[in-house]
């Protein structure tokens, strides 16, 4: 997918979703419903189960991201199962000029695709989508090393915003989607800001050649970048930057009577818990 120059039709090759003033994508997609969007996605993938921390799986995380799984574990939600949502969103085009609505919509599509599977009945399904926003363009996940280099260089010496949309579908009414049982849905988008300093070409090349950019919005992971000594800082919830806004998610799950089964652990969880105190 291409990153468009302020969504106007020009730009470098980049695995990004672009939502700017006026938008460039399809706006009528939702009229056909999520099934239409999933069926017309450019690439479908078979459902694949991913490992999770030990516990009774009352929560299904519709994500292949190891960072999101790690965050759930660190915040005490051991009772989850992580699975691929069942489709790829790379072929979808935005239908809204709102960046927040776009990432929330993609999060819902992921949760919806997994929730319609019979194995999801009686459980809570969580979907999430993360992208970076700068100069009116929404930058998603790079697909090649060159795209990753271009994204990181574009961020240097500037501030950009990171948005993560979350969708929760509660199927504990007894049935699944399409049944007569009640289904509860929650959607939200959280925002944080990242300031990235200037990296040397050696730092960029070493990072990209090591494959650290793969599967990450904007081509980087905040925790790994900070640990590597990058000149990087943030404001807002760091877990939003990492792909799952745990401050808001913990609150949303508590309203559904889902609570951590263990004490939060890890530096990120501890920092976020302290910020909530």
Image (cartoon, rainbow, N blue to C red):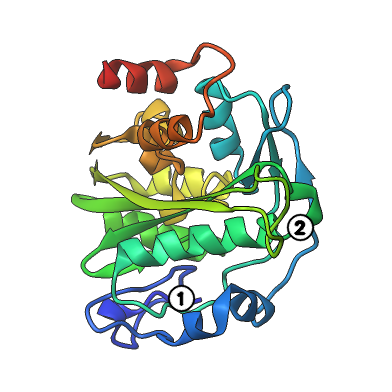
Q: Position of residue 263 (x, y in %)?
A: 52, 11
Task: Say which residue appears at 54% left-offset and 44% top-offset.
Answer: 212
Q: Is residue 179 left or right of residue 210?
A: right
Task: Say which residue appears at 21% left-offset and 67% top-offset.
Answer: 135
User: From what the image shows, is residue 148 above or below residue 196?
Assistant: below
Q: Which residue is mark 1?
A: 13
Give the mark, 1 or 2, whose residue is nearer the N terminus.
Answer: 1
The circle on residue 128 is none
Task: Say which residue appears at 61% left-offset and 38% top-offset.
Answer: 66
Can residue 188 be seen from the camera position used here? yes
Q: Which residue is mark 2?
A: 117
SS at mark 1?
A: loop
SS at mark 2?
A: loop
Between 46 and 32, the one nearer to me in the picture: 32
Q: Is residue 179 left or right of residue 72?
A: right
Can residue 165 be seen from the camera position used here? no
Between label 1 and label 2, give the one nearer the viewer: 2
- Label 1 – label 2 distance at C-alpha: 35 Å
Instruction: Find the residue positioned furthest to the top.
Output: 263
Q: Give the quadrant of the C terminus.
A: top left
User: From what the image shows, is residue 161 above or below residue 106?
Assistant: above
Q: Position of residue 127 (x, y in %)?
A: 55, 51
Q: Position of residue 196 (x, y in %)?
A: 25, 44
Q: Position of residue 100 (x, y in %)?
A: 32, 61
């Amino acid at each position: 997918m291409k990153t468009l120059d302020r969504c106007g039709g020009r730009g470098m090759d980049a695995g990004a979703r672009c939502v700017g003033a006026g938008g460039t994508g399809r706006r009528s997609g939702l009229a056909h419903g999520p099934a239409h969007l999933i069926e017309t996605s450019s690439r479908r993938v078979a459902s694949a189960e991913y490992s999770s921390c030990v516990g009774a799986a009352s929560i299904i995380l519709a994500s292949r991201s190891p960072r999101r799984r790690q965050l759930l574990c660190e915040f005490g939600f051991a009772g989850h199962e992580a699975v691929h949502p069942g489709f790829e969103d790379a072929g979808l085009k935005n239908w809204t000029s709102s960046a927040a609505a776009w990432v929330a919509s993609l999060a819902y599509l992921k949760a919806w695709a997994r929730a319609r599977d019979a194995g999801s009945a009686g459980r809570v399904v969580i979907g999430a989508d993360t992208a970076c926003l700068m100069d009116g363009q929404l930058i998603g996940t790079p697909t090649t090393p060159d795209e990753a280099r271009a994204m990181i260089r574009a961020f240097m010496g500037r501030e950009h915003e990171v948005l993560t949309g979350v969708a929760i579908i509660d199927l504990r009414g007894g049935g699944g989607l399409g049944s007569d049982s009640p289904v509860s849905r929650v959607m939200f988008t959280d925002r944080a800001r990242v300031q990235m300093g200037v990296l040397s070409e050696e730092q960029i090349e070493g990072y990209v050649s090591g494959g650290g950019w793969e599967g990450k919005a904007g081509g980087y992971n905040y925790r790994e970048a900070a640990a590597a000594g990058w000149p990087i800082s943030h404001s807002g919830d760091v877990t939003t930057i990492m792909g799952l806004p745990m401050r808001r998610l913990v609150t949303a799950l508590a309203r559904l009577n889902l609570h951590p089964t263990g004490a939060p652990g890890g530096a990120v969880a501890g920092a976020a818990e302290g910020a909530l105190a």
